[in-house]
Amino acid sequence: MKTRTYMPVFMAAVMMLATSALAEPASEMLEKAIFAEETVGDLDAAIGIYKQILSDAEANRALAARAQFRLASCYLKKGQDTEATEAFEKLIENYPDQVELVAQARQEMPGRLVVGAVPWDDGEVMRMMMKLATGMELGTWAWTADRVVTDDGKDAWRMQTYRYIALNGTQVISVVQADPETFRPLTSRFDHPLLGETLAAYTPTEVHLSGTGRDENTDNAVEFDELMFDNEQAVYLIRRLPLEVGYKTTLPVFVTFTGKRLEVPLEVLEKQTVTVPAGEFECYKVDLVVESVMHQTMWFSADANRYLVKINAGGLNGELVSVTEKMQGEPVEYHDRRLGFTLSAPEDWYIYEFGEDKSEATKIHLIDPDAAAMSVMNAASLELTEIDVDKPLREYAQDRVSIAQKRQEGYTVRPDSWVERSINGRSAVSYVADYLERGQVMVEYRTYVLGEATLSRLRVFSEADRHDEIKPKIDQILSTFKAK
């Protein structure tokens, strides 16, 4: 009895496709090759057809470029990195007019930056204390990440970074939206009090920049032919890398406010145990070199979360204070640990408690996502204030005006701005004043709230043209304030 050998149906179909391909139009051949590659999973058959398309002089350039790209992708899937690199390089060299495919080829070539799984949770907030080398507290860094849908309907990770120096109210805020899988940036915003605001919209081949700087407006496009990430997503990018001792790579980042691309070498030097206010962590010590002149050192937790635990950068040090989770649509809550007052702010705001003073006083900063104002609340027990609770609260506020007039040039209260009211059962008084700061017209919106055992003062400083924008948001926060 003869033994019969049966050929799998899919394999037979692929062979038929390959043997009949020469007599068919290149467009049909491409479809059959894609079928063999993606549906059947026979990479060798697909490679054969792609090569036949490329040998056909009648194939149009766009179609041939697609075949060249898919040929390289097949080699990549087979683990043949040398052949894949050669095929991608041929695409880049022979089809420079196929701009998007060329850009994609540069991303896919072996040796590219490998971006792994996301280690953070939706809504994660990392809070870090910012210090000088002397140990003096300056302010805070905060990083938040959440899933969003962009204005044009794309799923994205939105990463926001707050840098806030409490001593002078300097706020630097950035927001980057990136593709969840490739992590390619889609849009970004960088807002700096000295550099102005820069907006960026990314495509596979260019980034369009717009915004308002201190000296002039920006409206231009920068072309590129290689993968780039936005500088402001770098911390999150590093968290997705396969960190281990000895790991090296180069971060291709674009700095939007300078319009400049940087190649930043990264190396994991060693593992270290690091103790910060948030606790003790086993960390990877990561060294970065920016333009060969500035070193930054970061410590990322060696666990699955890859938290940024510590950072030394340009004379500033940062230490992780907490990692929390925010819920979309839920306000940001603050509960004072010493005086017992509470308040809430919109979900995209950030509340920062400055200092570790253990006395009966609290100072918090309310950081708005648009950097429209500097908002500071001071609260203290009545024993630490000079208030006479038997007199009207407005009388106390008017006495404070004379102090402000000595400190701030041209400080003048708008006569019709005085408002006396009750905030959740507590007496409150507010006013609006104009003043000058380095020749610029500024506005202060000040509110006092008298509790049974505390006195609280909220001061909001903004440029004159932003007062009407920020005041309703501050009033919303004040409506949630509850004092003992």
Image (cartoon, rainbow, N blue to C red):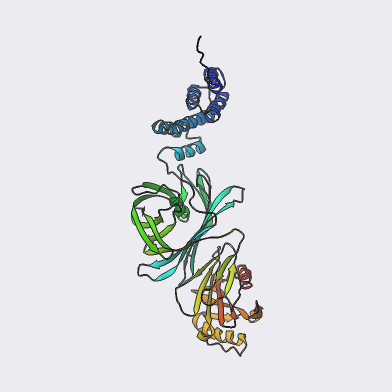
Query: Who is closer to the viewer here, 143 or 419?
Result: 143
Q: Quadrant of residue 418?
A: bottom right
| On-image quarter of the C terminus | bottom right
Residue 176 visible in the shown view: yes
Q: Is residue 22 above or below residue 316?
A: above
Q: Is residue 455 above or below residue 116?
A: below
Residue drawn at x 39%, y 47% is 250
Q: Is residue 174 above or below residue 378?
A: above
Residue 218 visible in the shown view: no
Residue drawn at x 43%, y 57% is 308
Q: Position of residue 145 (x, y in %)?
A: 52, 56
Q: Quadrant of residue 413?
A: bottom right
Query: Who is closer to the viewer here, 418 or 411?
Result: 418
Q: Position of residue 36 (x, y in %)?
A: 53, 26
Number of callouts in the render?
0
Q: Position of residue 142 (x, y in %)?
A: 48, 62
Q: Position of residue 364 (x, y in %)?
A: 51, 72
Q: Is residue 430 above or below residue 319?
A: below
Query: Who is closer to the viewer here, 317 or 208?
Result: 317
The answer to whether residue 166 is left or right of residue 456 is: left
Query: Who is closer to the viewer here, 317 or 336?
Result: 336
For this orientation, the residue located farthest to the front is: 1
For this orientation, the residue located farthest to the top is: 1
